[in-house]
Image (spheres, rainbow, N blue to C red):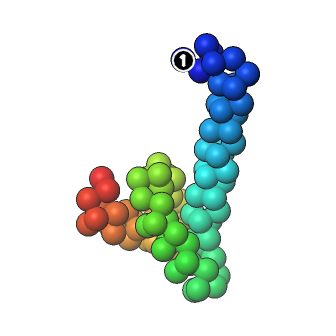
Amino acid sequence: VLASAGDAGAKQLGEMLRETIANDQKLKGYVADLGSETFAVREAASRELVAQGARALPALKRAVESADPEVRTRAGAVLGRLGAKGVY
């Protein structure tokens, strides 16, 4: 479908890919922040990941396997909150 749209389709696809990559980078940052030395940063990251909902699930499922116990614990807690909200 996008191929038949020509240049406009290619432009739209490019924008969609950029948005997806930017969102993935944000999620990685939030997951990394779960292990921050600063409590407020860890809390903000948890809130942001909950707000991301289903988009955050793949990153969180990887995070529960982290070598960092704080990241593991917080990722598990966020998954629990998302589960309670019926996200998965």
Q: Residue furthest bottom?
A: 39
Residue 27 in picture, x, y percent from top left: 58, 58
Residue 59: x %, y % from top left:
51, 53
Residue 50: x %, y % from top left: 43, 67
Position of residue 32 in the picture relative to residue 75 (left or right): right
Q: Mark 1 points at which residue?
A: 1
Q: Which residue is drawn at 59% across and 21% down?
A: 2
* Vertical order, 19 against 27 (above or below): above
Q: Which of 28 and 73 is in front in this view?
A: 28
Task: Check the image and report above or below for 43 versus 83.
Answer: below
Residue visible at 65% across and 33% down in the picture: 12
Residue closest to the far top: 4
Q: What kind of residue is marked 1?
A: Val
| Mark 1 nearby-residue class (10 Å; few <14, some 14–19, many ≥20) | few
Residue drawn 63% across the image and 18% down it:
5
State the image coordinates of residue 43 (x, y, percent, origin top left).
Answer: 52, 80
The answer to whether one can see residue 83 in this image is yes
Along the viewing direction, whichever of 45 and 69 lies nearer the viewer: 45
- Residue 85, quarter of picture: bottom left
Q: Quadrant of the N terminus?
A: top right
- Element type where label 1 sits in the image: loop
Residue 17 appears in view:
no
Give the number of callouts. Answer: 1
